[in-house]
Amino acid sequence: MERIYAIGDVHGCYDKLMDLMDRIDINLEKDTLVFLGDYIDRGPKVCEVVTYLMGLKARHPNVVFLKGNHEEMLASYLTDFDKFTYLVNGGSQTLESYMRHHGEASFPIPQAHMAFFSSLGLYHETEHYIFVHAGLRDKIPLDMQGPDDLLWIRGPFVQSENDFGKRVIFGHTPFTHPLVAPNKIGIDTGAVYGNKLTCVKLPEIEFYFS
């Protein structure tokens, strides 16, 4: 039986990520590991997080990385589309992290990291699950869901009792404890706010915490 592990919003919490990876009983040669986005911003060790994730993908092709709204905000910042929103939502911590490691460069974010951000998908679908950063809009086919909803939706999705065809595994909206509902499982438990970083193992619905 295929096992899938999903990890919620890391937000630069490198130490918690390392602790969590030590705790989960994953076999990266055959199990699938899905990260739900928001690797950057607010936390202190963004550069370390992204470097680790890139190395993980290079060693284990079964690792899937999704895009979060914070990666979307970074893209807007870098294109001068919306610098203010990014900086006031934790972007300054990301830039400071890269400056500590690459401060001698005129552009502190390495091109390899930029390529990683550009490679992120909006959702990942398996036989029984849909993995997405924020959630889905009711009664819209998956391939027609808009990026704004996939990356940003909160209340309408969290409160929805809609049958999405498959159970939705999501992050983005922080909870004190994982949200488990018949149609969804939410695993952003606010690691960057002093709470836990969470992983769920499927289909068992077994949780691991940093």
Image (spheres, helix red, strand yellow):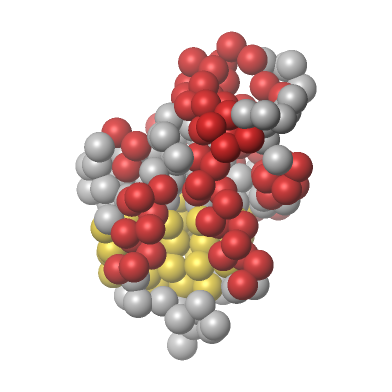
Q: Vertical placement of 161 versus 146: above or below?
A: below
Q: Nearer the viewer, residue 183 or 83?
A: 83
Direction top: furthest residue: 84
Left or right of 161? Residue 76 is right
Q: Considering the image in quadrants, where does the C terminus appear?
A: bottom left
Q: Vertical placement of 47 versus 74: above or below?
A: below
Left or right of 146? Residue 56 is left
Q: Nearer the viewer, residue 100 or 10?
A: 100
Residue at coordinates 73% horizontally, 48% vertically from top-left? 112
Residue at coordinates 34% horizontally, 68% vertically from top-left? 22
Left or right of 132? Residue 200 is left
Q: Nearer the viewer, residue 164 or 207?
A: 207
Count of labels in the image = 0
Direction front: furthest residue: 104
Q: Nearer the viewer, residue 148 or 90?
A: 90
Residue 185 appearing in the image = no
Residue at coordinates 39% horizontally, 72% vertically from top-left? 202
Query: Which image quadrant is residue 42 in?
Result: top left
Residue 28 appearing in the image = yes
Q: Position of residue 195 (x, y in %)?
A: 24, 42
Q: Position of residue 45 (x, y in %)?
A: 45, 40
Residue at coordinates 55% horizontally, 57% vertically from top-left? 53
Query: Which image quadrant is residue 5 in?
Result: bottom left
Q: Position of residue 113 (x, y in %)?
A: 68, 45
Left or right of 206? Residue 157 is right
